[in-house]
Image (tube, helix red, strand yellow):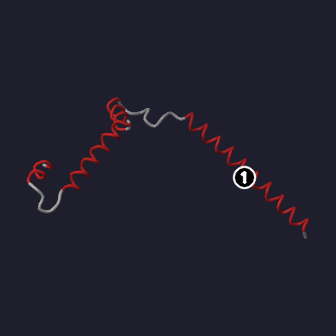
Amino acid sequence: MLLLLLIMMMMMMIIIIIIIIIIIKFGLVFSCIELLRPPYWSSYSKPRLWLHTVVSSKYFDLGIAAVIGVNVFTMAIEHYNMPKVISIFIR
């Protein structure tokens, strides 16, 4: 009984090792195929490539985050019976 259990555990370990090897091998094959493909933006026209470059830059992200932050701030300071100064400042 104990021998049978030991044999089953050895077989399961071998199967797990084979599965890991297959996953690693196919993972390497897929990554090599990805390296051979040209980038997705290689067929873009010049204006579209320029726009893609601008929109995907970190400075554009920071600018959008700043606009969202200012918007949240102006929405947060609006309240009922607010003074005229704040109302003029917001507009």
Residue placed most toward the observer, 43 or 11? 11
Say which amino acid is labelled 1. Ile
Q: Residue furthest bottom?
A: 1
Q: Position of residue 45 (x, y in %)?
A: 36, 31
Q: Residue furthest left?
A: 84
- Name the residue at 82% across, 61% down: 9
Residue placed most toward the observer, 83 or 48? 83
- Residue 82 placement: quadrant: bottom left
Q: Is residue 63 left or right of residue 44?
A: left
Q: Is residue 18 left or right of residue 54?
A: right
- Name the residue at 28% across, 48% down: 69
Q: Is residue 65 left or right of residue 2?
A: left
Which secondary structure lies at badge 1?
A: helix
- Residue 43 placement: quadrant: top left
Q: Position of residue 32 (x, y in %)?
A: 61, 37
Q: Which residue is mark 1?
A: 19
Crowd class of label 1 (few under 14; some 14 to 19; many from 20; radius 10 Å): few
Q: Position of residue 28 (x, y in %)?
A: 65, 41
Q: How many marks?
A: 1
Eyeballing the image, is 48 above or below 7? Answer: above
- Name the residue at 35% across, 36% down: 59
The quarter of the picture where the N terminus appears is bottom right
Residue placed most toward the observer, 59 or 79? 79
Q: Position of residue 75 (x, y in %)?
A: 22, 55
